[in-house]
Amino acid sequence: MAKAKAPDYTIKTYNQISEAGLATFKPNYEVSDKSARPDGIILRSFDLHSEPIADSVLAIGRAGAGVNNIPVDGLSKRGVVVFNAPGANANSVKEIVVAALITAGRNLAEALQYTAGLSGKDMRADVEAGKKKFVGRELAGKTLGVIGLGAVGYRVANAGVDLGMKVLGYDPALSVHNALQLLPEVNQIENLDELLKTSDYITLHVPLLDATKGLISAEKIKLLRKGATLLNFSRDELVDEKALLKALDKGNVHKYVTDFPNPTVHGHPKVVAFPHLGASTAEAEDNCAVMVASQLQDYLENGNIRFSVNFPHAVLSRQPDSLRLTLAHANQPGVVAQISDILHGAKVNISELLNKSRGELAYTIFDLETAAISGDVIDRLEAIPEVLKVRVLPRNTGSASQ
C-alpha cells in the first residue's frame, strides 16, 4: 500500500473556524487543532498571550479585525507575520450599530423589558398605560458623530445619511480609499472636540492602541452635548466608563450603548449592553475566515503579505522558474545592501526585488535566477543582526502568479 503523501503545510486552528474558511485551504494543507509544529495558526478570539507558540510558526491569521488576543510585539521580533481581516465583518457591525441607534432613540431595550414583565388579563390596559414611559425620538434631523472612518465607520456614516441624519466624521488617518466611499453629505471634521460638542449620537470605530486607549476621557465626556448618546462597538477601553457613569447619573448623557459588558457598566439603568454581537453573523464569520485563509496561503507559498498588522504590504508577482527568497528584518539603512552583497558573492543573480517598510520593521522579497541557495549563504543571511526571519520558497515552475 502506497504511503500517504505528507502535507506541504500544516495549519493549527483555535476556536471554531467557519467551514467556508477551512474549505479555502488547498489539499496540500493539513488543518487541525492538533498540530504541534504548525507553519501557521488561524484563530478568532482565543487568547494567545499565555500560549506557547512553536518556533515553526511563520504566520498567524486572526479571522476578525482586532488582534488584542495576539502577542504581536513578541511575534514581530521573531519575524512572524500577523494577519487580520479588515472590512470582512464591516457590514455586520454597521447593521448592529444602526440597530443600536434605533434601540437607543426609541428606548426599545427598556420597552422590551417592560413587556416581558407583563402578566394577567389586563395586559392590554397595562400596555397602553405603560407605553408613555418609552416615548422616544426620531433619528431624522439629529446629528451623528462618527469617530473613525475605516471600513466600518464610513459605512455607518453613510447609513446615517440614509436615515436622514446630519453626519460628522472624524478621522485624522482617513485613507484615500475610504474617503472615496463616503457620501458627499458626510461632513468631515478635523476637530474631535467640536464633534463631541455638537453631536446627538456619537459612535466609536477606532482600533484599541496605546494612542487611542481612553480616547473618550473624563475631560472629553464633559464636552458631550447634554442628552447625547454614546455608542461603543470598538473596545470598552476606549472610554473612561467610570466618568461616563457619573455623567449618566447626573443626566448630562442620555444613554450608553456598548457591545462590551463588564462589571463597571453592568446593571446600570442607562446602559444598554450587547454580548459582543457586532461581528456575530454567519456571513461575517465566513468572510473573515475565507480572507485570512487566503492570506496565510499566499504568504506561505509566495511570501506575499496582504493586510498584516505588523509588517508592510508586500506583493510581488512570481515569474516562471524563479526561486524566491524573503527576509523579515529591522527597518535600518544598509540591510538590503548587505543581503545583496552576500547574494552577489555567491554568484546569485537577482531578477526581481521588492523592499517595503512599516515603522521599525521591513520586508524584502528577492526573486533569484538559481536552482538553489546553499546552507552557507542562508547562515550568512541569518547572521545579519537586523534580520529576523529568512525563508527560501521552492522554485515556481508554472506560469507567473500572484
Image (cartoon, helix red, strand yellow):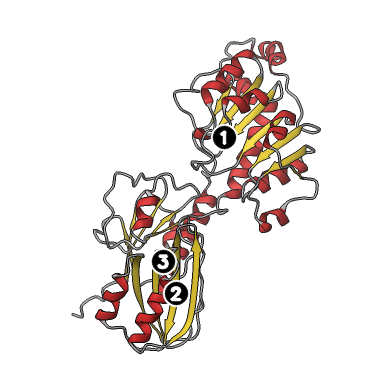
Q: Position of residue 259 (x, y in %)?
A: 53, 34
Q: Nearer the viewer, residue 185 or 9?
A: 185
**Amino acid type, residue under disc 2 in the picture:** Ile
Q: Position of residue 373 (x, y in %)?
A: 31, 83
Asked whether the residues under the numbered discs 1 and 3 touch, taking CB atoms below 8 Å apart as contact, a structural biologist would say: no
User: Closer to the N terminus: mark 1 or mark 2?
Assistant: 1
Q: In the image, is residue 342 above or below residue 287?
A: below
Q: Position of residue 191 (x, y in %)?
A: 70, 38
Q: Is 315 left, or right, of 54 in this rendering? A: right
Disc 1 versus disc 3: nearer the observer: 1
Question: How many discs appear?
Answer: 3
Indicate the quadrant where residue 221 lies.
top right
Res 52 visible: yes
User: Closer to the N terminus: mark 1 or mark 3?
Assistant: 3
Residue under numbered circle 3: 25
Q: CA distance from mark 1 to mark 3?
A: 39 Å
Indicate the quadrant where residue 330 lies.
bottom left
Residue at the image point whose x is 26% and y is 76% from the top: 5
Residue at the image point whose x is 27% and y is 60% from the top: 55
Residue at the image point whose x is 20% and y is 77% from the top: 3
In the structure shown, which secondary structural element does the residue marked by tag 3 occupy? loop
Neighbour class for label 1 at 10 Å: few (<14), some, many (≥20)? some
Q: Is 129 left, or right, of 49 in this rendering? A: right
Indicate the quadrant where residue 157 lies.
top right
Residue under numbered circle 1: 215
In the structure shown, which secondary structural element does the residue marked by tag 1 occupy? loop
Q: CA distance from mark 1 to mark 2?
A: 38 Å
Res 325 visible: no
Label placed on residue 145: none
**Amino acid type, residue under disc 3 in the picture:** Phe
Residue under numbered circle 2: 365
In the structure shown, which secondary structural element does the residue marked by tag 2 occupy? strand
